[in-house]
Amino acid sequence: MSLPVEIVFGIYLGIITGILPALVSGVLGFVFKYVTGVTIPGLGVVVLALAIAGINGGLLALNDETIRSSERAPAILTAIVVILMISLYAHAQGDKLGATVPKRLSLQQLRDRTLSTDVVELVGGRGRVTVDVAGEVNDMEGYPPLPAETRRAIVDGEWTFPADLPLVELEDRFAERLRTELDLADVAVRIDERANATVAAAPPTGALSKRVPQGKRAVSVPALVPTGIARGDVVRVLASDLSVDGTVLAARTSGKPEPGASKSATDPGEAGGDPLGTERTDAEPRGDGDPRTDGGEAPAAPPAASAPTTTGGEGRVTVAVDRSEASALLRAGRGRVLVLSRGTRREYELTTLLRRAGKRFRKVSVVPGGPLDGHTIGEVGVREAYDVAVLAARHDSWTIAPSGSQPLSAEDELFVVGSRDALNRFAEVAR
């Protein structure tokens, strides 16, 4: 045969014989780079490829005697060159793949889908995304149908979240926000990369009973309801010679006097005003004074507004009281409602007073070998020398308002108060 034909035959022979050496070279290159971070030398790839190709060529020569002929030397040399080229290329690609594949890959990373950059808005230098509810809000299986008002509130609401959240976290936050703001029993949310949400929700069920703490009873008392009462307020109900403290669960004002008896849930006959409760159940006190409702299914109510409060006037207030006081409060008639102060935390008052005087707080540590190490507060003269006061010190344990005999050693922590300049000077010697 002519030389060009031999070269073409050698290329064909090299491709057929070099498939297996190239595959082995590529896999070994990937494994070595991924596991050890080491690249196999090119000489090692050549030796390995030639060894595998020699085995393939020997098997091929056993089937075709013309390959062993000396006249096929150009074809064999061409085949060797093709085999080496394919093997070196496969090794380079395997080595590159081993360097780029992440070493740790978890299922959580596979689930962390992210939003498209087209839907991200920059507000104040931070990314924000507005989630739009696509289509109709679906009902959840096993629950009553969702009221039309709640569907409109979900679809028409403005739901904004940080844009740096993965979609899984964004779905959880959206569902929790819907559950909290609209008092839904259950929510399922699916959000795509374009911030379009598919929502399925269930209406509230047993809203009042879920808010009653363990061991408490909910009792509703007709009274002149103060303006601005909200859920969670602590009130005192005065009825006859009875005085009971409780937490507000719901309140409703009707604008007209109603000298009725106490009931253990919100009266459905009331109208107008600003209701705080979402469950309305008829209840009459039993003859034995047992504060339990008659039962019945509560109709679904529209979603409560954010942080609802009463407008004031005649109405009812439902409070959570102790079990022993519930029966006595039910037997009482009309009551008076006093809103109790929750008090002010004194540490916040102290902080405010100090800030008004131009003072600041700072936490510092005693540096080893410094002027404070190995001395007491009185020996150093912290107040006189640095114009700061030590509010608390931790030597073995925290000491509030330590005396001058308080020892100081390396790594002790101090809370000091003073002007900004005085704190800066003290910090230079303390840490």
Image (tube, rainbow, N blue to C red):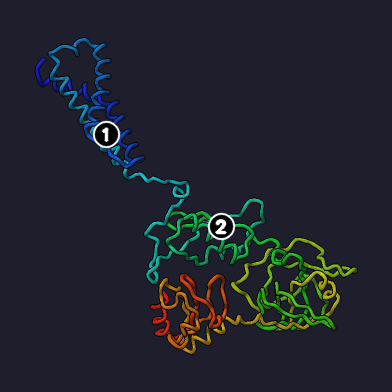
| Residue farthest to the top, as pictured | 65
Measuring 27% from the left and 19% from the top, which residue is drawn there? 55
Residue tagged by mark 1?
A: 90
Q: Earlier in the sequence, mark 1 or mark 2?
A: 1
| Residue farthest to the left, as pictured | 2
Q: Which mark is residue 415?
A: none
Location of residue 267 with respect to 198 vertically, above or below:
below
Q: Is residue 296 left or right of residue 134?
A: right
* Category of crowding for the residue at label 2, using alpha-carbon neighbours closer than 10 angstroms: few (below 14), some (14–19), many (at least 20): many
The residue type indicated by label 1 comes to Ala
Give the alpha-carbon distance from disc 1 to disc 2, as whole Å. 53 Å
Residue tagged by mark 2?
A: 137
> Nearest the camera: 306 or 82?
82
* Category of crowding for the residue at label 1, using alpha-carbon neighbours closer than 10 angstroms: few (below 14), some (14–19), many (at least 20): many
x, y percent for residue 428: 38, 78
Q: Nearer the viewer, mark 1 or mark 2?
A: 1
Q: Quadrant of the N terminus?
A: top left
> Nearest the camera: 197 or 173?
173
The residue type indicated by label 2 comes to Val
Location of residue 23 with respect to 341 vertically, above or below:
above
x, y percent for residue 176: 56, 61
Measuring 63% from the left and 70% from the top, which residue is drawn there? 304
